[in-house]
Amino acid sequence: MRHKVLHVIYSLYRGGAERLIETQLLGGDRRRFEYLVCSITGGGDMIDRLSNAGSRVFLLGKRRRGDLTAVTKLANLIRHEKVDLLHVHGSPGMFWGTLAQIASATGVPIVRTEHNPYPAGQLPALYRLLYQRFTKRASRIICVSELVRRSFAERSPALADRFIEIPNGIRMQDYEKLPPRAECRAQFKLLPGAKLIGTVGRMVSVKNHKLLIEALFRVRQTVNDVHLAIIGEGDMRESLAAYAADLSVSEYVSLVKETQKIDYFYGAIDIFCLSSDSEGMPLTLLEALASGVPVVSTEVGGIPEVIENGKTGYLVPKGSAEFLAKRIVELLQDPSKAAELALAGRKMVHERFPAEKMIRATEAIYDEVLAKTDPKR
C-alpha cells in the first residue's frame, strides 16, 4: 500500500527548499510513497522539474495578502486526493497548510520542515499569534541543522521533543564529473582566464551580496586579475549593479540570471563565497564542496556545522568584508592550500551529506507518524 504525501510550499521558484523537495522526489521510495506538491502561489521552472521527477503539481494561485480562498482550495485537494500525510515547508507552509488541514476535517497528520532559523521579529503578527497552536498540530518538525532546531525548540520548550535535526543532503552524482573549466565559463560568458570568485543565491538583503562586492574591491587592491560572478534572481539586482559602480568594479562583476546548469557554474569558479547574514544549511555550500571548490563563508546559521575552519574551508565573521577579502586573497595566492581545502571539503560532504541519508531519515519520520495514525502499519 502506497501512502500519499503532499508537500506544501509557498511558491515553486527555484530555491533551497524547492530543490530539497525535488531531491526527495527523485530518491524517495516510490513503492511506499506517492509524492504530490502544492504551491500556495505559483512557480517557475521548478514546476517542470518536479513533474519530470514523477510528481503531480498543484498551483493554488494565491495573489494577494489575506486571500483565504487558498485554504479552501488546499482543503479540497487534501480531501479529493485522500492525502495520508501533509509535509509543510517553512512558516508560510505551516500557516496555510495547517489552516487547510483544520478546514479539511480529515485529521491528516502534519510533518513540517524548517529550512532557516526562527525569524524572530520577521513573522507577520497573525503567524506569531498562531505559532504555538499550529506547532502543536505538527507531529514532527524537521530542522535542517542543529542551530535551526535549537532556535525553534527554544520557542516551544514544552514541545521540544517534536523538533528533530535532519541535515540537508545533495545528489553527489550531479557534481562528480564537471565539464572542462573553459566550457563552463563559456556557458555564462565569463572570462576564460581570470581568477573567479562565485556565489549562488537569491539577490535579496539576507544574502548580503553587497558585502561580497566590497570584498572584491578589497581583493583587487592586492590581486588584479580577479572577477566576481553572482548567480540568482531577486529584487536587488539593480542595487547591486549600482553598488558595484559606486566602487568602480562594475566591469569585474557579473550578475548572472538563474540557470538550470548550476553544476557548470561550480565548474567555472575558483573560490565559492557565501556572505549571508543568516542561513539554515545552504544547499549551495554543499554543492560547491561536492564540486571540489574551496569555500569561504560567513560564520552564520548551520554553516559551522559543515565547515571546520581551516580544514574544510574558511569561516569569517558576519558582516566583515575585510576578513572575507583576506581569506580570498590567501587562497588566490596559495593554490596548494586552496587545493587542500577543496579535497578535504569534498571528502567530508560525500561522507556526511549524501541525499540518500536525508531521504531515508525523512521517510523514517513519515513511517513513525503514519504508524501513530494507523496502528496496523
Image: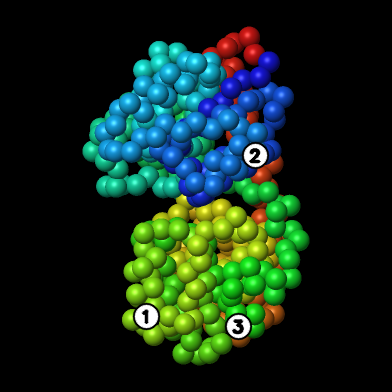
The label shown at residue 331 is none
Residue under the point 56% across and 58% down: 259
> Label for residue 52?
2
**Residue 196 position (above or below residue 343):** below
Q: Which residue is mark 3?
A: 194
Question: Counting residues from the N terminus, which is met first, the one under dot 2 or under dot 1?
Answer: 2
**Sooner in the amino-acid sequence: mark 3 or mark 1:** 3
In the picture provided, is 360 more to the left or to the right than 125?
right
Q: Is residue 34 visible in the rendered structure shown here?
A: yes
Residue 311 visible in the snapshot: no
For marks 2 and 1, give the one nearer the viewer.
2
Q: Residue at x 29, y 47 (%)?
A: 122
Q: Position of residue 39 (x, y in %)?
A: 46, 35
Residue ID for mark 1: 245
Quarter containing the N terminus: top right
Circle 1 Cα neighbour tier, 10 Å, few/some/many (<14 / 14–19 / ≥20): few
The amino acid on which the numbered mark 1 sits, given as a three-letter code, is: Ala
Q: Which structural element holds mark 2?
A: helix
